[in-house]
Image (cartoon, helix red, strand yellow):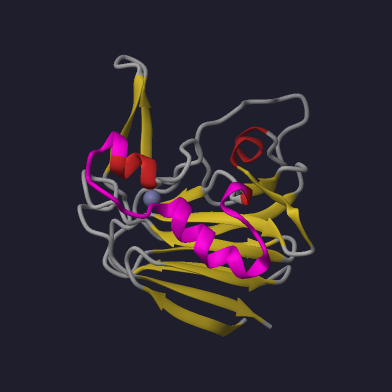
């Protein structure tokens, strides 16, 4: 496959990109420890979108009769839609620890920054993705829960809550996906600079599309 598209997206910015079935989307973490929130829409029917809960629980390629709802997704797993159809397959990830991606938490947003963290007015991934996909007639309320690439979000049963940790991705590590349907992909380079989520700083990523 050859590279069809390449764009560096600075920290705290977003991008909308279209990909056709069979094309690959590669997200390169240029400086390391950077989370990228990703929303997916069926390009031919924008009402059908990513479902992280179906992606965790309505997986394909499982053994018939063996059903295990799971808590993370990694190479070979498939991101499913709200209609329980395959949207994307995770093809490869180069970080030393695989499967460090969040599929439980909704995006950061202005409410989190202003009210819950007390950091003052700041756009979150919800606002950033909303702006990126606005040219398609989509509104903020259309944005589904995202697949948060590189986000370390682990549940502590003893503490009874979730904990955000440092991403496993190093500078130059990438995650690559194959489109299983025509997709509109909305991306946000997570702007959070408090705590370990993005290693303390929102840094650029490179978005690449490969095809024949
Ligand atoms: Zn975010």
How far across and down, in percent of the image, does residue 70 sit? 56, 30
The quadrant in which the N terminus is found is bottom right
Q: Picture coordinates of residue 19 (x, y %)?
A: 66, 71
Residue 91 within the magenta-colored segment of the rendering:
no
Residue 195 makes an appearance in the image: yes
Answer whether residue 93 is visible to the viewer in this image.
Answer: no
Residue at left offset 54%, top offset 51% = 75
- When the figure is inspected, residue 103 is found, relative to residue 93, above or below; the finding is above
Provide the residue span drawn in magenta. Answer: 115-141
In the displayed structure, 208 sits above or below 146; it is below
The count of marks equals 0
169 horizontally vs 90: left or right: left
Q: Residue at x 71, y 69 (%)?
A: 22
Q: Is 123 contained in the magenta span?
A: yes
Towards the viewer: 114 or 24: 114
User: Where residue 85 sits: x, y (%)?
Assistant: 76, 47
Locate the C terminus and report the quarter of the image it occupies: bottom right
Q: Position of residue 40 (x, y in %)?
A: 62, 56
User: What residue is drawn where x is 34% and y is 63%?
Assistant: 12
Who is closer to the viewer here, 54 or 185?
Answer: 185
65 relative to 38 in the view: left or right: right
| Of the pair 92 and 144, the residue shown nearer to us | 144
79 left or right, relative to 92: right
Classify 211 as above or below 41. Answer: below
Q: Is residue 185 above or below residue 48?
A: below
142 or 100: which is nearer to us? 142
């Amino acid at each position: 496959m050859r590279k069809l598209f390449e764009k560096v997206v600075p920290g705290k910015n977003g991008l909308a990109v279209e990909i056709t079935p069979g094309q690959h989307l590669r997200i390169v973490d240029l400086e390391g420890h950077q989370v990228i929130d990703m929303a997916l829409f069926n390009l031919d029917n924008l009402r059908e979108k990513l479902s992280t809960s179906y992606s965790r629980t309505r997986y394909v390629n499982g053994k018939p009769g063996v059903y295990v709802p799971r808590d993370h997704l990694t190479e070979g797993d498939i991101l499913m839609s709200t209609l329980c159809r395959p949207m994307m397959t995770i093809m490869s990830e180069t970080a030393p620890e695989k499967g460090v991606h969040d599929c439980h938490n909704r995006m950061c947003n202005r409410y989190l920054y202003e009210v819950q963290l007390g950091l003052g007015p700041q756009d979150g991934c919800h606002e950033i993705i909303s702006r990126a996909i606005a040219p398609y007639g989509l509104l903020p309320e259309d944005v589904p829960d995202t697949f948060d690439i590189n986000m370390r979000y682990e549940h502590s049963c003893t503490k009874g809550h979730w904990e955000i940790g440092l991403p496993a991705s190093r500078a130059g590590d990438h995650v690559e996906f194959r489109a299983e349907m025509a997709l509109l992909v909305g991306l946000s380079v997570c702007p959070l600079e408090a705590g370990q989520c993005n290693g303390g700083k929102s840094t650029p990523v490179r978005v690449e599309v490969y095809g024949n």
